[in-house]
Structure formats: structure tokens, C-alpha cells
């Protein structure tokens, strides 16, 4: 855990756990003695002993003393369990053995690049927000009036392009074997805790004041929790789902970064891919998941690279993660457009998602994976820049043209 860049001390958990176990043993012994006393008193009275007999009185006094002690021990044990749970929930997942060790994003490993031949040679490419405003398809000022900064309004062909991208992504992923779901866009605290957003990332989420409900930060949360508390049949695995949802994030701590454009918004659209798989194949399934996300970028002919995150840049719940970064020519940089992670049994343990194999005793925890397939706004930003023409128009990627019924913006 310390390779993640933090300083994780599990000794307090070990000590609290020892205290809780000792209390549990003591409580169990006292409860057994209390049950024994109750049985003895009943037997003696049944056999004709006077209820006022000194021996019965002594047993009852001992029983009352035990009950008083138990009434003190039980809340103590419950409090210890709560403390242990709070500390355990704050611990991140363990990095996989194959995750590169590093301190920050500077130590991430580039795995491969694709589409260098599609990098535009036009030296005068405008940032996507500027070309979007010139074309009249993106408006920030009116969105700020309606909400606040970090919101945008898409207009006309901009709205149509966003909708087309969502449909295109869903169609491709359904063809790849994913079953589409439309989950609730509001989620409860138990759901966010199960996938790892709570308690650590509470400040990143928007909470409804009157209910135990939060705006979903990503479809990962509601889709994973569709199976919370369930025991699945092994023959039903793997389960693949794709889902479009709007996503809502506070972006706490990112003030001053990406204030303009579609990169870092409080509200954005995303198509998410979620898998529930047998533990023996989860890392193979991660590679396939990355391939599913890459297929969208390749179909759109958008240049990108695949990055393997090091331990110091790994997400809280993930054991291994690949990021896909798309080329944005206006800044001359690759920017994240998808993050694909294997969580092994981390989320399944918190969510109690298990499976049962025929002929085997007990149950096992499933392995969960998810990734963006893709972040829609960032995909639009990449199209507006990579397909920008010298005359100020934007060509529509060929794969999207049937969805829009036009070739140029």
C-alpha cells in the first residue's frame, strides 16, 4: 500500500481487532454461562426446589450480574466494530504484482500509440471551445447563467453530435457483447461505499440535501450495485454491461485547471463498460476491456496512446489501470479519455457480490472491472480539434456521418 504514495498504518486496525476479538470471547463465555444458569434454575424449580431457595437466589443474582456486564460489553464491541470498519474503508486496494511502482503520473508507463498518421498537420488549430463557439454549437456564458462555471450548453449540431456519439458508442459496445442498461442516475450512500467513492471521495460528489441520495459520478456506481448483496451462478459469468449516464463531479481541488472547454466539467456524459467475471480470468478481461474502449477511438480515427498507471497514480479502488489518452492538437498533448481498471475482489467484498460454483462448497467473490467507452465530451473535443479544417469547418468522422446525416460542421 505504501507504494501508492501514502503512509498506511494498519497497526491500529490490528489492535482494535484484537480488542474486539477478546470482547467477543468474553461476551460469548458470559452468554453461555447466562444460558446455563437459566437452564439450571428451570431444572431445579421443575424438580421441586423452592424458588426462594438460597441456591436459586444465588444463581439468579449471578445471572443478573452477567446480564448487567453483557449490557456494557455489547455496545463496547459494536463501537469497536464501527471503528474497525471506518479504518478499513479508508484503505485503498492493493496494487497488482504487475502494476509498475512509481510515485506520480511521471512514472506511468506508455504501452503503445495508435494513429500517428491521423495527427493533423494544420498549424493553426483552434482549441475546441473556440471553434465550438465560432460554429455556434457550444455556449458557456448561457450555461454559467443557468448554473455556474464548469457547465456548458450544446446547441444545434453540437447537441446532435453529442447524442450521435452516445448512440454510436452504445451500438459498438452492444455489438461487442455488452448488455445495455439504463440505471438510476441517483445513488444511495451504500452504493457509493461499495464501489469505493465513499467515504474517501465525499467532497467530489453532489449530495441531495433531503435524501440519502447522490448524483452519480459515473455509471460504474449504479451498474455495479445492481448485483449488490447477490449470489450469482458461476455459469452466468461473465456479465458485461454498458450504460450511458450523465455524470456529476465537484472537481474539488482542480480549480484553475481546464476551466475552459469540455475536459473538466461538473456535468458530462459518458458511456461506461462494467464487467463481473470469474477471478481466474479478470486480468485477461482487463485487456479485452481496454480493446473495447480503443475500438471506439480507432473507428473515429482519433490518435491516442495507452498508459499503464504506476502505483502512485492508481485510483483508490483499482489494482491495475490503463488510461487511454487522446491527442488534442491545440495543446500538443495527450489527454485522458478513458480509464480501464481491474478491481479484483475489492468492490465485490464491499458490495457482497459473490458467485457459487456447482459442486463446490461455499461461495467466492466475483472480480469487477470497468472503464469508459468513452467520455463523450472529451471525444467531442478531440473531434473538433483533430477534424478541424483550414477554412474553419469541422469534418465529421466517417463512422459518425450516418448518425448525423451530414459530413461537415
Image (cartoon, rainbow, N blue to C red):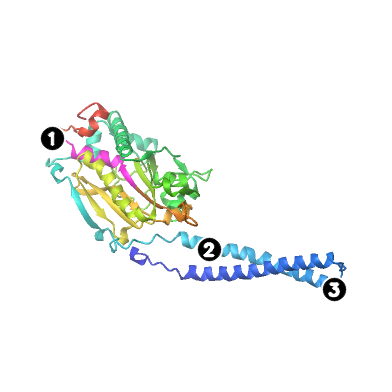
Q: CA distance from mark 2 to mark 1?
A: 62 Å
Where does residue 171 sit, x and y in percent of width and height? 31, 35
Q: Position of residue 399 (x, y in %)?
A: 22, 34
Asked whether 299 falls inside the magenta stretch, the response is no
* Residue 110, image x, y percentages: 22, 55
Give the number of the mark in front: 2 or 3. Answer: 3
Q: CA distance from mark 2 to mark 3?
A: 44 Å
In the image, residue 173 lies at what x, y percent? 31, 39
Does residue 376 show up magenta in the picture?
Answer: yes
Give the camera-side residue of 278 and 209. Answer: 278
Q: Is residue 226 left or right of residue 144?
A: right
Secondary structure beneath dot 3 equals helix
Residue at image mark 2: 83
Residue named by callout 1: 390
Pointer 1: residues within 10 angstroms few (<14), some, or many (20+)?
few
> Which callout, 2 or 3, points at the residue further toward the start of the chain?
3
Q: Residue at x 37, y 46 (%)?
A: 274
Quadrant in which the C terminus is drawn: top left
* Residue for badge 3: 54
Amino acid at each position: 500500500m505504501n507504494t501508492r504514495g501514502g503512509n498506511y498504518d494498519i497497526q491500529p486496525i490490528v489492535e482494535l481487532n484484537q480488542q474486539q476479538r477478546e470482547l467477543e470471547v468474553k461476551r460469548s463465555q458470559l452468554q453461555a454461562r447466562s444460558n446455563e444458569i437459566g437452564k439450571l434454575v428451570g431444572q431445579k424449580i421443575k424438580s421441586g426446589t423452592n424458588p426462594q431457595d438460597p441456591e436459586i437466589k444465588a444463581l439468579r443474582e449471578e445471572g443478573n450480574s452477567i446480564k448487567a456486564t453483557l449490557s456494557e460489553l455489547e455496545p463496547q464491541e459494536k463501537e469497536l466494530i464501527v471503528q474497525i470498519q471506518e479504518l478499513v474503508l479508508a484503505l485503498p486496494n492493493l496494487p497488482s504484482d504487475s502494476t509498475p511502482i512509481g510515485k506520480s503520473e511521471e512514472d506511468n508507463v506508455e504501452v503503445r500509440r495508435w494513429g500517428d498518421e491521423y495527427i493533423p498537420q494544420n498549424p493553426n488549430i483552434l482549441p475546441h471551445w473556440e471553434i465550438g463557439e465560432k460554429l455556434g454549437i457550444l455556449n458557456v456564458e448561457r450555461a454559467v447563467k443557468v448554473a455556474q462555471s464548469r457547465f456548458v450548453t450544446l446547441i444545434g449540431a453540437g447537441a446532435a453530435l453529442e447524442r450521435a456519439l452516445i448512440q454510436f458508442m452504445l451500438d459498438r459496445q452492444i455489438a461487442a457483447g455488452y448488455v445495455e442498461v439504463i440505471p438510476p442516475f441517483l445513488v444511495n450512500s451504500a452504493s457509493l461505499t461499495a464501489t469505493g467513492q465513499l467515504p474517501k471521495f465525499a467532497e467530489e460528489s453532489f449530495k441531495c440535501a433531503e435524501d440519502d441520495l447522490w448524483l452519480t459520478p459515473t455509471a460504474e456506481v449504479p451498474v455495479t450495485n445492481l448485483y449488490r448483496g447477490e449470489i450469482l451462478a458461476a455459469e452466468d459469468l461473465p456479465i458485461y454491461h454498458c450504460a450511458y449516464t450523465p455524470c456529476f463531479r465537484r472537481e474539488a481541488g482542480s480549480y484553475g485547471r481546464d476551466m475552459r472547454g469540455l475536459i473538466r466539467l461538473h456535468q458530462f456524459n459518458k458511456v461506461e463498460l462494467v464487467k463481473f467475471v470469474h477471478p481466474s480470468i479478470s486480468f485477461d478481461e482487463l485487456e479485452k476491456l481496454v480493446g473495447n474502449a480503443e475500438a471506439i477511438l480507432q473507428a473515429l480515427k482519433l490518435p491516442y496512446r495507452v498508459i499503464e498507471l504506476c502505483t502512485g497514480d492508481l485510483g483508490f479502488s483499482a489494482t491495475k489501470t490503463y488510461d487511454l489518452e487522446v491527442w488534442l492538437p491545440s495543446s500538443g498533448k495527450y489527454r485522458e479519455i478513458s480509464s480501464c481498471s481491474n478491481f479484483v475482489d475489492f468492490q465485490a467484498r464491499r458490495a457482497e457480490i459473490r458467485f457459487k460454483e456447482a459442486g463446490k462448497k461455499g461461495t467466492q467473490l466475483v472480480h469487477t472491472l470497468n472503464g469508459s467507452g468513452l467520455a463523450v465530451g472529451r471525444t467531442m473535443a478531440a473531434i473538433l480539434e483533430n477534424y478541424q479544417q483550414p477554412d474553419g469547418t469541422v469534418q465529421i468522422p466517417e463512422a459518425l456521418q450516418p448518425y448525423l446525416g451530414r459530413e461537415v460542421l
